[in-house]
Amino acid sequence: MMATKDIVIGEILISVPLRLIITPKSLSSTMLSNHISCITDSKLTAHQSLALYLILERHKNTKSSIYPYIQMLPKNFDTVPICLDLELLEFLPNNLKEDVKSQKLKFEKDFSSVCRFLKKQLNSDINITYNEFLWSWLCVNTRCIYFEPFKSINCDVSENIAIAPMLDFLNHNFDVKMKGEFNRVTQCYEITTFTPWKKGQQVFINYGPHDNFKLLLDYGFTIPNNPFNYILLDDEFFKLNNEVENFVSKKLNLLMKNGFYGDYALHASQISFRLLTALRLHFLRPINDISSQETQHLITKWQNTISGKYEIVSYENEIEVYEWIDSVCKELIKKCDLMLEKVNNTNSIPSGSLENLKLLWNESKNILTSVIILIQDSKNM
């Protein structure tokens, strides 16, 4: 979508009237015979209802009231990981691989629910295939907006979704500042920009502070130099079992009690405080008897780094922490190189997915390299 005039900060980019927004509640009998009234009266989730609606409209072909929109939707979602062959899923980073598995389970649960609903509620001649529902499910997943026309206290947030076809023309840019919300006075969904645009420029919106894993998982694309990218070191940290099991368990309990269990990330030239905190506890020496005076003194010193009273537990402890991070980064760079080699030597990867995979591994490598440089620079200070 291009700017037809200069657009200033605070100006409304686009305003979509409520009557042009597709919500589960808006699917009434006036829109699609009695099928939709059955959908709205069902216990289907918002995602399930909207996906089924798109299929039923697609079946109507040119008779659909939203035929131009159906024609505009993607014919496939080849770059979305849930659509990749099992062989190609092996090229994904581990945490993204787990997210894909979870997403696939959710999709298959939704598909089963909709099939049961069709069998019980609608005419028996309406059949949908796995791939057909995957198409409509992803159409909703990649295009839905958060939509809350009326304040509700006990409503599940995931149910507050809708499709506003006009918004499909606006693409994502992480630099853009904007606000999207339903205006109860004008009864329109409005996007207000806090980024100025010149006449003739392409206008963007911001889907949120999403890293490339999230963008690829939910939308099927990645962005070079995405500032929200990160590398998770949970697997590496929890493999640090070089102490007897009893001591490891006590330290893990301390992490959990203090709110530092898991989510250990590296960003470009940045090591998360959560990771540093967990490693400082891990490298405390000695942890013999948890109730001993020596142990309690060490734990107090560690807790003081959390509160900000002290920056480090000890010089020796800090050296061990950073040496471990440096070592892990170097090992993970080797893995990145290996995965990039495999990706480049596999001919069965579609071009779009190939570029996404290469970007994921290259940018992971860049983050790891930047952290190594950060550690080296700190040694030279």
Image (spheres, rainbow, N blue to C red):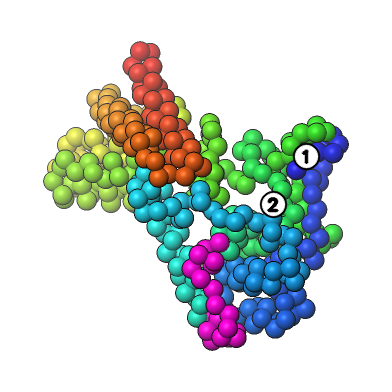
Judge by depth and name the residue closer to the eye, 115 or 209. 115
Pointer 2: what residue?
168
Pointer 1: what residue?
2
Give the residue drawn at x 28%, y 41%.
236
Q: Is residue 130 magenta?
A: yes
In the shown orientation, is residue 227 left or right of residue 311?
right
Q: Position of residue 167 (x, y in %)?
A: 72, 52
Judge by depth and name the residue closer to the eye, 58 or 240. 58
Where does the C terminus fall, quadrant-wise?
Answer: top left
Where does the N terminus fall, quadrant-wise?
Answer: top right
In the shown orientation, is residue 34 left or right of residue 335?
right
What's under tag 2, amino acid-wise? Answer: Asp
Q: CA distance from mark 1 to mark 2?
A: 13 Å
Q: In the figure, residue 164 lies in which quadrant?
A: bottom right
Give the residue drawn at x 54%, y 53%.
77
Give the residue drawn at x 82%, y 42%.
11
In the shown orientation, is residue 89 left or right of residue 83?
left
Mark 2 crowdedness (10 Å alpha carbons): few <14, some 14-19, many ≥20:
some
Q: Which mark is residue 216?
A: none
Sequence-wise, the earlier of marks 1 and 2 is 1
Q: From where the camera sits, is residue 294 visible?
A: yes
Up the image or down, 180 lies above or below 233; here it is below
Q: Is residue 162 magenta?
A: no
What's under tag 1, amino acid-wise? Answer: Met
Q: Position of residue 20 (x, y in %)?
A: 78, 63
Q: Which residues are magenta?
A: 117-135
